[in-house]
Image (spheres, helix red, strand yellow):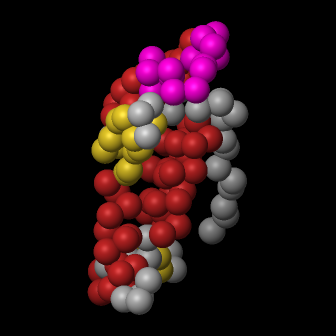
Amino acid sequence: MTTRPIRLKRTGLTWPMVGAALLALAQTPSVLPGNTAVAAADGGIDVAQRKPAVEAAVNADDSHLDALYKDLQRIRMLAFQETRTAAKLAAEMRKIGFDVTETVGKTGVEAMSLTVMPALQWNQTANPSS
């Protein structure tokens, strides 16, 4: 089997989203490619099955992110006055499936991918002290 690297687009806002996707994948219990019996038994995933989905997400058309990045950068951001920036980022994160909490520390935005939850539950079962 040959492997090829995942091509990453270099867009200002793409990297955090890619990082979140790869973090979720890395925290999920995995097995050797093709060993689906073990994956089913321990709640893990077959990493080879997930690779096309990760590649598709990474290589998806994200041209709208360039416009969003430029729009956010043209406005001065003063401490605790970034309400427009926070609202735009919260809307973008909701659009791609994150559970978003706004007004954290006045203008902060907190986003959590619900796809990470099974990995967190598995981690708590495997390592109850953490």
* Identity of the residue drawn at 36% across and 89% down: 128
Q: 22 and 57: which one is in front?
A: 22
- The quadrant in which residue 108 appears is top left
* Identity of the residue drawn at 37% across and 35% down: 103
Residue 24 lies within the magenta run: no
* Identity of the residue drawn at 38% across and 50% down: 112
Q: 71 and 49: which one is in front?
A: 71
Q: What predominant SS class does the magenta segment belong to? A: loop
Can you see residue 78?
yes
* Identity of the residue drawn at 59% across and 32% down: 13
- The quadrant in which residue 63 appears is top right
Q: Position of residue 66 (x, y in %)?
A: 60, 19
Residue 82 lies within the magenta run: yes
- The quadrant in which residue 28 appears is bottom left
Q: Position of residue 82 (x, y in %)?
A: 51, 22
Q: 29 and 89: which one is in front?
A: 89
Can you see residue 42?
no
| Magenta-highlighted residues | 72-86
Screen quadrant of the C terminus: bottom left
Screen quadrant of the N terminus: bottom right
Q: How many marks?
A: 0
Q: Is residue 2 left or right of residue 72?
A: right
Q: Is residue 120 above or below residue 102?
A: below
Q: Is residue 49 left or right of residue 74?
A: left
Q: Position of residue 12 (x, y in %)?
A: 65, 30
Q: Position of residue 60 (x, y in %)?
A: 51, 33
Q: 106 and 55: which one is in front?
A: 106
Q: Is residue 102 above or below residue 46?
A: above
Q: Is residue 95 above or below residue 25?
A: above
Q: Is residue 57 above or below residue 122?
A: above
